Image: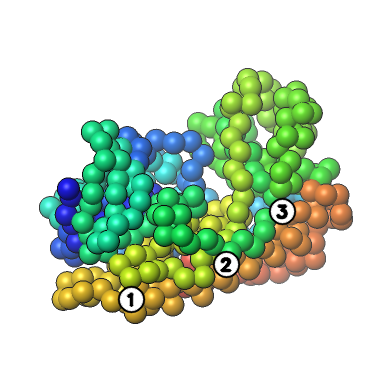
């Protein structure tokens, strides 16, 4: 049996950041991570200015930025061969006026190393929560099943949350007309330097500069994976080369469909994020579309808000159901607004472009951004900081 004040399920960005913040405040916290390490491909790797600001407030920023990363100070979209500047992060009121592209495992390893400096932090790898019990939960380890006694369980175990299923909770689905195929291609000298989205001929490709390779997201209609595979890998390679001609000499790096990973896009949200002694944050409470890459940073904002609200309660008494509801009251409004923006972009812009409606015709808002450059600060603010950035209080 393991006894802890707070058990955080899930060693992703929300879970690890919350574990660090609680341990830093002297709260005994145990984080469960079902894998043996953090090394997994095609996780959210965008560290937005809001998260970099949290790192500054923790005093970690300079050390954090010594790790390899690729800065993105502007965002662009190419439609039918014409490039439109859509986001300018250089005017944000933050210490870092860029998005840092960094492998998520590097970010999580950094947070874990900082958290381990506190004796009240405990990280249990290869430990998977399998069910809830009164006063804690049940988990599976390589040595067998264990019980964990905890005053508070916080589920940060992602969009397929086991804890959420065990609690009998089901999020409301808001629909997503797209899915994404993730892949990587070698980056070479002479490649275009911009990280941007490309749309042409009813197809869309997003390329992210990762230093020695490009991480690419090929957008398909919802449920379109079977049709894409049925058309054959050569046709898929050709589509990529058409959208990004400089990739024509390396699309053969995609040897099989095993080199291409499907992300089934979902946008959903729990009506209630808590039960007595149980709280959901991050993707376990609200799955986000990959548009803008904001999911990781919303999860971290959830963690910061949770720590700000619960640390005084944990230090001086018991956490009440109203305290847990206060987290949802704080974080649900920016989540709703962000999801509405994502759904608007999906339904009114991306899906019509994929289906051929208005093919290769740039919308008016993009044309306005070229004529009035200050307008580019609006999407930069929404992407880089969100509707309600959180700050470290304790």
Q: CA distance from mark 1 to mark 3?
A: 36 Å
Q: Nearer the viewer, mark 2 or mark 3?
A: 3
Q: How is the image coloured?
A: rainbow
The quarter of the picture where the C terminus appears is: bottom left
155 horizontally vs 250: left or right: left
Foreground: 100 or 345?
345
Circles 1 and 2: CB distance less than 8 Å?
A: no
Q: Residues within 10 Å of mark 3 (few under 14, many from 20)?
A: some
Q: Which residue corresponds to mark 2?
A: 338
Q: Which residue is mark 3?
A: 177
**Quick one: SS at disc 2?**
helix
| Residue projecting furthest to the front | 134
Using the rendered image of the protein, determine whether residue 252 is visible from the camera's viewpoint.
Answer: yes
Residue 343 screen position, x and y as percent? 67, 63
Sequence-wise, the earlier of marks 2 and 3 is: 3
Q: Which mark is residue 321?
A: 1
Q: Residues within 10 Å of mark 2 (few under 14, many from 20)?
A: many
Q: Residue at x 27, y 61 (%)?
A: 134
Identify which residue, 193 or 235, lies in the foreground: 235
Residue at point 33%, 70% (across, down):
276
Q: Earlier in the sequence, mark 1 or mark 3?
A: 3
Q: What secondary structure is found at the residue carrying circle 1?
A: helix
At label 1, counting other C-alpha atoms closer than 10 Å, the crowd grade (few under 14, some 14-19, many 20 or more) is some
| Outermost residue toward the left in this view | 119
Indicate left or right for 216 with 20 as reference: right
Vertical side of 114 occupied by 252: above or below: above
Q: Position of residue 222 (x, y in %)?
A: 71, 47
State the separation of the CA atoms marked 1 and 2.
26 Å
Q: Nearer the viewer, residue 317 or 133?
A: 133
Between disc 1 and disc 2, the foreground one is 1
């Amino acid at each position: 049996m393991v006894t802890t004040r707070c058990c955080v399920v899930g060693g992703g960005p929300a879970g690890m950041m919350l574990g660090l913040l609680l341990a830093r405040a002297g709260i005994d916290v145990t984080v469960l991570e079902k894998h043996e390490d953090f090394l997994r491909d095609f996780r959210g790797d965008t560290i937005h200015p809001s998260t970099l600001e949290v790192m500054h407030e923790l005093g970690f920023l300079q050390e954090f930025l010594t790790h390899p990363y690729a800065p993105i100070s502007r965002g662009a979209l190419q439609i039918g061969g014409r490039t439109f500047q859509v986001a300018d992060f250089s005017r944000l009121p933050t210490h870092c006026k860029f998005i840092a592209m960094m492998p998520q495992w590097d970010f999580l390893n950094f947070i874990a190393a900082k958290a381990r400096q506190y004796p009240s932090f405990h990280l249990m790898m290869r430990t998977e929560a399998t069910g809830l019990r009164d006063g804690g939960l049940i988990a599976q380890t390589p040595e067998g099943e264990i019980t964990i006694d905890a005053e508070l369980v916080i589920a940060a175990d992602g969009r397929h949350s086991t804890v959420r299923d065990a609690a009998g909770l089901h999020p409301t689905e808001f629909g997503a007309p797209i899915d994404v195929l993730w892949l990587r291609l070698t980056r070479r000298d002479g490649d275009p330097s911009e990280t941007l989205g490309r749309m042409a001929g009813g197809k869309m490709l997003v390329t992210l500069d990762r230093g020695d390779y490009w991480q690419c997201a090929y957008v398909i209609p919802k449920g379109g994976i079977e049709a894409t595979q049925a058309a054959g890998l050569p046709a898929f390679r050709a589509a990529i080369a058409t959208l990004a001609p400089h990739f024509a000499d390396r699309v053969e790096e995609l040897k099989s469909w095993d080199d291409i990973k499907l992300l089934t896009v979902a946008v959903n949200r729990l009506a209630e994020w808590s039960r007595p002694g149980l709280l959901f944050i991050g993707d376990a409470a609200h799955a986000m579309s990959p548009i803008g890459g904001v999911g990781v940073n919303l999860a971290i904002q959830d963690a910061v808000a949770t720590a700000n609200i619960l640390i005084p309660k944990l230090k001086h008494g018991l956490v009440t159901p109203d305290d847990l509801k206060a987290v949802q009251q704080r974080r649900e409004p920016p989540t709703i607004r962000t999801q509405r923006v994502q759904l608007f972009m999906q339904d009114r812009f991306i899906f019509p472009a994929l289906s051929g409606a208005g093919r290769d015709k740039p919308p008016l808002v993009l044309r306005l951004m070229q004529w009035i450059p200050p307008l580019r600060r609006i999407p930069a603010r929404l992407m880089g900081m969100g509707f309600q950035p959180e700050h470290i209080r304790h």
